[in-house]
Amino acid sequence: MDIKFNKQKIPHHVAVIMDGNGRWAKKKGKMRIFGHKNGVQAVRETIEAAAEMGVKVLTLYAFSSENWSRPKKEVDTLMSLLAASLKKEFKSLQKNNIQLRAIGDLNNLPNKARKELEEVIKKTLNNDRMILNLALSYGSRAEIVNAVKSISKKVVNNELNIENIDEKTINNHLYTFSLPDVDFLIRTSGEQRISNFLLWQIAYAELYFTNTLWPDFKKQNFYDAISEYQKRERRYGKTSEQIK
Ligand code: IPE
Ligand code: IPE
Ligand code: MG
């Protein structure tokens, strides 16, 4: 890493909406899938850059619950690409002491991808340099609905008193229960929307939008994003004077 960052201001949890693969391919006169394949290198660079910098949790939005509505051929290729990448990248996760986790409706994944995922999760369980959290078949509203259901069950079974429900209760019933809130959210490709990603968890995240299409996203792009984050003042409702 060639640039010096303020070590005190490295975001603990960074989340990324990796967008723009299709447009990247189209610009080159290729099929959308070509963009997805070339997006894998950007994933590698981002993981490496984040780990080297001391980010503790990196959540990558790889496939949304809405993405199931894409043409079957694209979905199938994305799922094969996921399984193949997990197989291929396992060694480097291990070498870099990175723990893999996943959030989303993982039961919807095809067997091969799910098995591969479960295996890498199991094998990297004791790694503790950074958590790489993949959002797969993920939808934030579905996650919240699930949380409401499990909390309701506990209330009905007298395991939980309504008066004791607080923000922590909700947090503890989300897929991300053991993870800290998102500090910094990056979205590539110029779109400025959240697309059903981590709605609860980004309540006070700093947002960063870049026009770079995902397959063009390199370590330097990640550094640029972090430099921008370090210039922000997170006030949490207080005045600037109170922060200083
Ligand atoms: C992001 O790129 C990857 C996934 C959503 C799986 P897109 O496939 O959304 O690319 P664009 O937005 O169509 O360019
Ligand atoms: C969001 O991107 C999901 C992922 C990056 C995996 P989309 O391309 O699916 O989102 P929309 O359709 O532009 O909102
Ligand atoms: Mg897109």
Image (cartoon, helix red, strand yellow):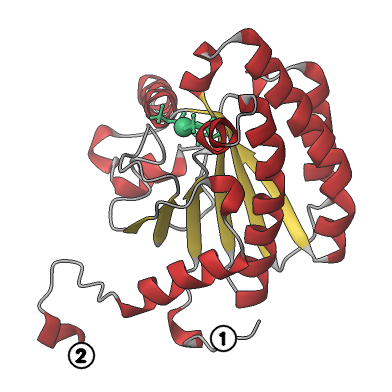
Q: Decide if residue 230 is on the left or right side of residue 165.
A: right
Q: Residue 119 or 36: which is nearer the viewer?
A: 36
Q: Decide if residue 218 is on the left or right side of residue 5.
A: right
Mark-to-mark CA distance, 1 and 2: 25 Å
Q: Position of residue 177 (x, y in %)?
A: 50, 46
Q: Position of residue 198 (x, y in %)?
A: 41, 41
Q: Residue 21 or 141: which is nearer the viewer?
A: 21
Q: Residues within 10 Å of mark 2 (few under 14, many from 20)?
A: few
Q: Amino acid at mark 2?
A: Lys
- Quarter containing ligand 2? top left
Q: Are marks 1 and 2 in contact (CB under 8 Å)?
A: no
Q: Position of residue 183 (x, y in %)?
A: 40, 62
Residue found 57% across the figure and 70% down from its top: 220
Mark found first going from the N terminus, 1 or 2: 1
Q: Is 226 placed above or below 89 here?
A: below
Q: Quadrant of residue 115?
A: top right
For disc 1, the marked residue is 3
Quarter holding the C terminus is bottom left
For disc 2, the marked residue is 244
Q: Decide if residue 66 is on the left or right side of residue 86.
A: left
Residue 182 shows up from this direction: no
Q: Position of residue 56 (x, y in %)?
A: 59, 66
Residue found 31% across the figure and 34% down from its top: 161
Q: The residue tagged with tag 1: helix, strand or loop?
A: loop
Q: Amino acid at mark 1?
A: Ile
Quarter holding the N terminus is bottom right
Residue found 68% across the figure and 25% down from its top: 78
Q: Is 74 placed above or below 127 here?
A: above
Q: Quadrant of residue 50?
A: bottom right
Q: Decide if residue 69 is on the left or right side of residue 161.
A: right
Q: Residue 90 or 124: which is nearer the viewer?
A: 90
